[in-house]
Image (tube, grey):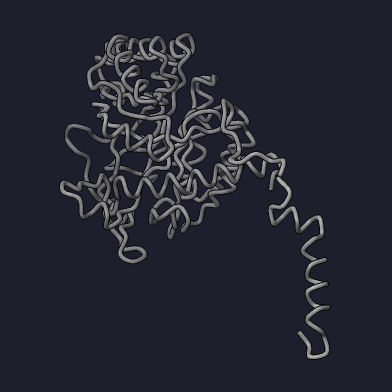
């Protein structure tokens, strides 16, 4: 305030300024017409977390406490799954306020390697998918690795000593094939997955179940001598054309998309517009060498524009599960008895709480921006 301006004139001007309609509304003197929080519904992403096979009541309570209503989990270890065991699992979770968004299926090595006996395996897979459909499980996820080269992972120290999961292909690229797996060429693996899809996808369609194949992660060119069908965008696109059906889809992972040097939003749009995204993994990375060397970081730190990815999913009206996976190792988790991270530098519940809170904020922001509320 200048010395020549009186206190009376200052307060008179300030009062008129504060009384202007735009500022009165911003200050909250007039209620806003928009609703908050923005509504989630049938055509919005479903935030989910992984749950243990036993569906422990304490674990389910922890999941619900942080605003998550959907879970993904490994299916029963023995194939074929039975409708009765799946219904029992679904009902236990429903009684705790949770729904099953996705079950992971495995246990078909002869199919992976194109060996005799794969016909019996595939019959068990098809029976399991039919049981999942009857029990109300909407998505069955699977992997198709000859070998997953996890030997290149190591822990890296992040902010204030938090654990990061780093990867360097040079640490593992010269490892020989394992005797029980052997080495399998790229086109051999494509032939095997094509046989799998042509047998399974029609059954999945009839059962009302969608299949989701996760990209190779780490997305290295060779894994103990074997080719990787899902280590490039070209491979992802090739997969969904083998059998042209929404039941033949992928797990879209924005972190892996960045690892292979692609634009996560553009890739999300390509698969989403073709209705081939059947599950989503939501995480961030810093890449040093495309496909070969990178670090998995907190979702707010990496090179993926996480809000842009979420806005694209909201624009598409993507309606299935979205998993904020790979939590970072926080001291609160490390200090717990029995701390056993799945990955070097990985965390547990405290890290998941951070991921969920960040993801929920991104979802609410994207929903608000899509409705023009902000």
Residue at horizontal 50 percent and vertical 56 percent from the top: 303
| Vertical arrangement, residue 146 with respect to residue 154, above or below | above
Q: Nearer the viewer, residue 266 or 322?
A: 322
Residue 7 x, y percent position in the rendering? 78, 81
Residue at horizontal 82 percent and vertical 60 percent from the top: 20
**Residue 198 appears in view:** yes
Residue 156 x, y percent position in the rendering? 30, 61
Outermost front residue:
8
Q: Nearer the viewer, residue 360 or 75?
A: 360
Question: In the image, is 195 to the left or to the right of 240?
Answer: left
Q: Tell me the quadrant of the picture where the N terminus can be found.
A: bottom right
Question: In the image, is 175 to the left or to the right of 204?
Answer: left
Residue at horizontal 74 percent and vertical 53 percent from the top: 25
**Residue 293 appears in view:** no
| Vertical arrangement, residue 212 with respect to residue 314, above or below | above
Outermost bottom residue:
3
Residue at horizontal 50 percent and vertical 51 percent from the top: 261
């Amino acid at each position: 305030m200048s010395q020549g301006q009186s206190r009376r004139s200052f307060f008179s001007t300030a009062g008129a300024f504060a009384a202007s309609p735009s500022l009165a509304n911003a200050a909250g003197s007039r209620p806003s017409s928009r609703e908050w929080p923005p509504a989630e519904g049938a055509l919005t992403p479903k935030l989910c977390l992984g749950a243990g096979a036993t569906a422990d009541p304490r674990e389910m309570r922890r999941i619900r406490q942080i605003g998550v209503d959907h879970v993904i989990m490994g299916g029963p270890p023995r194939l074929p799954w039975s409708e009765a065991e799946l219904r029992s699992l679904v009902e236990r979770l429903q009684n705790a306020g949770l729904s099953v968004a996705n079950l992971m299926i495995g246990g078909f090595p002869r199919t992976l390697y194109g060996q005799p006996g794969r016909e019996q395996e595939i019959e068990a897979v098809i029976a399991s998918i039919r049981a999942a459909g009857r029990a109300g499980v909407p998505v069955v996820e699977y992997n198709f690795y000859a070998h997953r080269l996890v030997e290149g992972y190591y822990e890296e120290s992040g902010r204030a000593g938090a654990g990061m999961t780093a990867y360097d292909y040079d640490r593992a690229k010269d490892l020989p094939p394992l005797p029980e797996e052997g080495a399998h060429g790229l086109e051999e693996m494509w032939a095997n997955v094509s046989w799998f899809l042509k047998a399974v996808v029609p059954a999945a369609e009839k059962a009302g179940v969608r299949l989701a194949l996760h990209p190779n992660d780490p997305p290295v060119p060779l894994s103990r001598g074997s080719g990787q069908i899902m280590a490039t965008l070209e491979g992802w696109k090739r997969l969904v054309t083998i059998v042209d059906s929404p039941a033949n889809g992928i797990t879209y992972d924005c972190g892996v998309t960045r690892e292979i040097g692609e634009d996560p939003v553009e890739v999300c749009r390509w698969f989403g517009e073709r209705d081939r995204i059947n599950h989503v993994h939501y995480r961030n990375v810093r890449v040093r060498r495309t496909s070969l060397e990178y670090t998995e970081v907190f979702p707010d730190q990496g090179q993926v524009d996480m809000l842009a990815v979420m806005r694209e999913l909201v624009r598409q009206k993507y309606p299935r599960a979205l998993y904020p996976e790979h939590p970072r190792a926080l001291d609160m988790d490390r200090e717990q008895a029995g701390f056993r991270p799945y990955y070097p530098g990985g965390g547990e519940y405290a890290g998941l709480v951070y991921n969920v809170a960040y993801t929920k904020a991104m979802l609410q922001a994207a929903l608000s921006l899509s409705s023009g509320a902000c």
